[in-house]
Amino acid sequence: MADPSSYRPRPGDIPDSPGVYRFRDEHRRVIYVGKAKSLRQRLANYFQDLANLHPRTRTMVTTAASVEWTVVSTEVEALQLEYSWIKEYDPRFNVKYRDDKSYPYLAVTMNEQFPRVQVMRGHKKKGVRYFGPYAHAWAIRDTVDLLLRVFPVRTCSAGVFKNAARTGRPCLLGYIGKCSAPCVGRIAPEDHQELAEEFCDFMAGRTGTYLRRLEKQMMEAAEEMEYERAARLRDDIGALKKAMEKNAVVLADATDADLIAVAEDELEAAVQIFHVRGGRVRGQRGWVTDKVEEVTTGALVEHALQQLYGEESGDAVPKEVLVPALPEPVEPVQEWLTGRRGSNVSLRIPQRGDKKALMETVQRNAQQALALHKTKRASDLTTRSRALEEIAEALDLDSAPLRIECYDISHLQGDDVVASMVVFEDGLQRKSEYRRFQIKGFAGQDDVRSMHEVITRRFKRYLAEKERTGEWADGADTDAPLAEGSGTPDSLVQGSGTPDSLAGGPGANGSLPDGGGAVFADAEVIADSLKDDDGRPKKFAYPPQLVVVDGGRPQVAAARRALDELGIDDIAVCGLAKRLEEVWVPGEDDPVVLPRTSEGLYLLQRVRDEAHRFAITYQRTKRAKRFRAGPLDDVPGLGETRKQALIKHFGSVKKLRSATIEQIQEVPGIGRKTAETIAVALAQAAPAAPAVNTATGEIIEDEEPDTTGGSSGEPVTAGVPDERRGQET
């Protein structure tokens, strides 16, 4: 615990102007980012008697080891810079709203020749119209199913579309009239585009004109005694009205607005947002956060606005934003929102009428969300805290291991030997810290030797970071070189991308209400930064309190020996053997046996199983890539984009092999020298053996089409190993 007076800047050194400040810990990680109208006055509030500070603010300033600031011209610039740094550094003490799930949107891909209606999650893409967010994907599909009767827009995937175009037969929706079947030419591209525009107009709330037009057409058809057409139009009108009923009118003046409500207590806050478009509620979402510092409702609203609109622009920012309390000061925030939209945005508190009544509904939703979250979170916090305490007691550690790293080795009969490193902070997965390794020091199967190599390489990186930042520990071997081959491929994070990474649960960091137990860090997946600037997530910068290896006594001994050789003696090591779930510690003849009902054992099993999953995934990826290798992979300087461009231009590797250098140069991005290199590489590579029809013995002329997984167009089925011949470990 640091003394804030040890790094307190002199008051005369702090400028009395707007700016953004950063607190850093002893490892130079940015742990808090804030903005101020006057940096001098704001920072002075942190360096006062600790007894006068909010408990969480006190924790932050005693965790920090330094503070720095950047001066800006206006408060709007400070707001923008604060948001950018919070996204970049992911500070543990900042208020960060986390979605409890990835909300689905109804999306229309207007950037395609034949726009497609589909459910989309995640980051928004350019050229795609979005409607929502919706609480459930099935709600989107129900709405789309009703509207396809009137707007038969394409909904199929690219693969289904191409297959239908190739066979000349549309899918089932095309036969039953819920798709205009552009795949087989039943509708021209410009007509289908217009149909998609009408669909978007209807979803955007412009429904009255279209309904009146359909009703007029129905009456005309009835007068002309075209009763079948009139009946069809009547059913279309009914389908549209049914779809509209799913979003009841809440504001009679067809307002476009977002309503934000906050429910909070001393420790946590829940935010609920209703998106109203054309007077109807088009979407709803919510977040929960720990109140890491003493913060007002207005400040919570300001952080929510940053989260909502920080990456939005244009119509995605509504004309009106209704909130329970205004940020202080409100002018910079309103000016920032206006800049994001490109026109004036009204930020205010509703005082009367329908908007105030709707705000009360949103407020009730926020209160229910907070109550539900606290019911789930209480047991979760208690369980994780107990698990860490049980591990510390069983392994005789001085304190609970807030950061645990687990390592596992994976291979297939000695081939493609890889290792994984997964990180749990405060009992939660920290997927941004996951790393993976290729075993390079030797060939063949030797789990013990592989474990020694991985631990050595990982902690040599850690020591190198300490040396670079001037934190070198006494007794460390300053002459020890970095491990050979420990470049960026070892540290690239693929993330698991699994749905559990998006699961609900605790949001930002915080501590237990009584101040005891672990400080709980969030487990959101963030992109691993490869930049080397101070404060950003680095590759191996932070040490664990406990290293867990997947294995028994030999693997544990190898890990301990690797740490001893590097002069590291303040990191505990243990291993979890799969057979009896025994916990092995270095130098002990007998394992530590935790009760089967122990929360500590359960946490160690989760850590071990996650390391095993991550290692197996990487090993399978490497093996599949090796079997997909083709002649273009051997061309130096030819990346994936240009390989795909070559295959797309010529259609297959076979046709590319027969092309001249001048023809290869016609591909965008391919120069004379590269074309010559490609021609030489393809001439030296033996063509794939022809396929044979096993029923007739006939040789099939293979055009070597590009495969979904390969980069060179070579078939990927030949040579794939039978999974039963070997066992992955």
Image: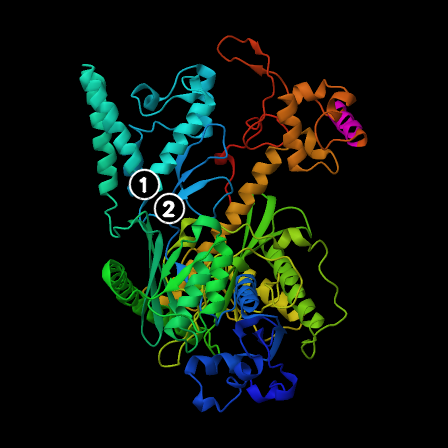
Along the viewing direction, whichever of 271 and 432 lies nearer the viewer: 271
Distance from Cα at disc 2 to Cα at disc 1: 8 Å
Q: Locate residue 61, reporting x and y percent.
A: 52, 81
Is 482 one of the magenta-colored residues? no
Crowding near pointer 2: few (<14 within 10 Å), some, many (20+)?
many
Residue type at numbered disc 2: Pro
The reply to whether residue 115 is in sight is yes
What element does badge 2 sit on? loop
Asked which quadrant contains residue 241, the reply is top left
Q: The residue tagged with tag 1: helix, strand or loop?
A: helix
Task: Point out residue 230 in the picture as x, y percentages from the top left corner.
Answer: 21, 21
According to the image, label 1 marks what residue?
A: 140
Q: Which residues are magenta?
A: 674-683
Q: Are marks 2 and 1 in contact (CB under 8 Å)?
A: yes
- Residue 322 located left or right of residue 49: left
Inspect the image, locate mark 1, and give the three-letter code of the amino acid beneath it. Answer: Ile
Q: In this view of the protein, which residue sits in the foreground, 21 or 584?
A: 21
The residue labelled by disc 2 is 104
Residue 494, how many percent across, how many down? 55, 50
As rendered, which of 679 and 627 lies closer to the eye?
Answer: 679
What secondary structure predominates along the stretch shown in magenta? helix
